[in-house]
Image (spheres, rainbow, N blue to C red):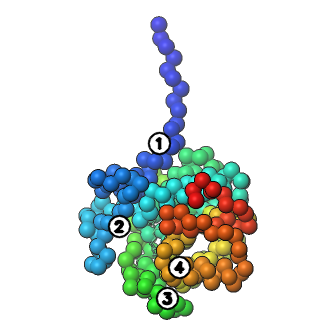
Amino acid sequence: MQTAAPPVQFDRDAYVDLLKRSITNYHYLGQEASFEQFRCVSHYDMDQSEWKIDRSVQPTTLLRKGQLDLIEQAVVAIEAARVPGDYIEAGVWRGGVIILLRALLGAYHIADRRVFAADSFAGIPLNTRAQNDPVDQWSDRWVAGLDEVKRNIERFGMLDERVRFVPGFFADTLHTLATERFSLIRLDSDSYDSVETSLEYLYPRLSDGGIVIIDDWHLPGCRMAVTDYRDYFGITDPIYEHDANAYWTRNGRNPLPGLV
Ligand SMILES: C[S@@+](CC[C@H](N)C(=O)[O-])C[C@H]1O[C@@H](n2cnc3c(N)ncnc32)[C@H](O)[C@@H]1O
């Protein structure tokens, strides 16, 4: 007698978890560290400004598990609240977050959003508005070319028409997004000028209830850019911190209370 095969179920959590382990290259580099503790930058020599590992095993993102979890939680909260708009990361380096965001669209059956990847693909320009921003000492540290980033995304099977590239320095490119609408903006460009310019062009495009994530909350220039921008425009939405990142909701309550 033949028994019916059990229905095939898609284990979303396992898929997304495995993807996070892959884009960080934890499965290869983690050694004794738990995934929660793993930091790929321990494989980077800050003084020499070079990786201590072979180029072929470099991670596609500098983010840690907790920071990747924050992105997933934001996507889930935006979907639950039906906040309109696409996702954008300004400052993508090798593209790991773009891979994750595109994968989340599939994993959560989100059909109507796109993922924008904005970067010079040539590093961080020197500050002109801020002085003594330490980021000026590492303007060429996190450089990945557009072709390389596209190859990385393609290698994960995530390169399609729903991934949009905005190549060039923010001051020259972000104004072209003036008719777009975003539900999630993730700023990861380190310096005062770059973060301030990103907010100037992207924040007005964020829907009410949309989420802004600031990666470099620990860097003084970034934090000052955010504070200056919020003060100038009278933005009082509370800032929450999670795993050294900051986030807030535009004109809304904390959408991710479980993470604080
Ligand atoms: C720290 S890396 C981003 C890390 C990345 N989000 C990840 O997941 O690992 C900073 C990126 O910001 C980009 N960037 C910084 N300032 C920029 C600007 N003004 N215009 C365009 N790209 C910029 C750099 O080229 C670099 O790729």
Q: Disc 2 versus disc 1: distance between alpha carbons?
A: 25 Å
Q: Residue at x 38, y 57 (%)?
A: 37
| Mark 4 or 1, nearer chain start | 1
Q: Residue furthest top?
A: 1
| Mark 2 or 1, nearer chain start | 1
**In front of the other: 95 or 186:** 186
> How many C-alpha atoms fall within 10 Å of the one at disc 2: few (<14), some, or many (≥20)?
some
**In front of the other: 85 or 212:** 212
Q: Residue furthest front?
A: 260
Q: Disc 4 versus disc 1: distance between alpha carbons?
A: 34 Å
Residue 206 visible? The answer is no
Kind of residue sitting beneath label 1: Ala
Is 20 situated left or right of 34 in this image?
right
Q: State whether label 2 is within 8 Å of ligand 1.
A: no
Kind of residue sitting beneath label 4: Cys
| Mark 2 or 3, nearer chain start | 2
